[in-house]
Image: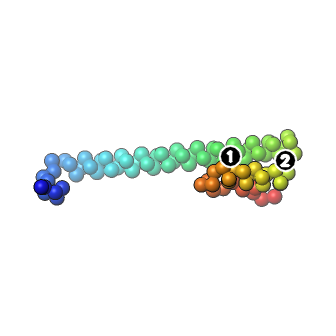
Amino acid sequence: MPTPDDLVYPNGYGAFLQGLKERVSSARVEALRTVNTQLIELYGSIGRDVGEQQRRQGWGSGVIRRLADDLRAEFPEVKGYSAGEP
């Protein structure tokens, strides 16, 4: 039975394969960039919303710590939910 090393590859196969690899790599980079952009926007909006609740409702550091704890419990794989600096 022939192995992949025994095959005679068609003319242009290497260039075709390289092009596919570049497309996959490029798409992966773009996907990560999109995800990072969305996360930055999300965290910014969370910060604004928390700040608004602090101003409107008078939330103190205890509520903010609890909010951070609850978010960490719900999303343990996500880093960065903290009460921040006082």
Looking at the image, which residue is at 75% across and 50% down? 67
Question: Can you tell which mark lies on residue 59?
Answer: 2
Looking at the image, which residue is at 54% across and 46% down? 35
Q: Residue 24 at what x, y percent from top left?
A: 37, 47
Image quarter in which the N terminus is found? bottom left
Report helix, strand or loop for mark 2. Answer: loop
Left or right: residue 25 versus residue 47 is: left
Name the amino acid, label 2: Trp
Q: Nearer the viewer, residue 27 or 70?
A: 70
**Other-residue count near label 2 (Cα within 10 Å), few / some / many at <14 / 14–19 / ≥20:** some
Q: Nearer the viewer, residue 39 or 82?
A: 82
Report helix, strand or loop for mark 1. Answer: helix
Q: Is residue 73 above or below residue 41?
A: below
Q: Residue 32 at what x, y percent from top left?
A: 50, 49
Left or right: residue 64 versus residue 10 is: right
**Other-residue count near label 1 (Cα within 10 Å), few / some / many at <14 / 14–19 / ≥20:** few
Q: Nearer the viewer, residue 26 or 77?
A: 77
Left or right: residue 17 versus residue 4 is: right
Q: Residue 61 at what x, y percent from top left?
A: 83, 54
Count of residue discs: 2
Q: Which residue is mark 1?
A: 44
Residue lying at the far top of the rendered structure: 56
Q: Residue 82 at what x, y percent from top left?
A: 72, 56
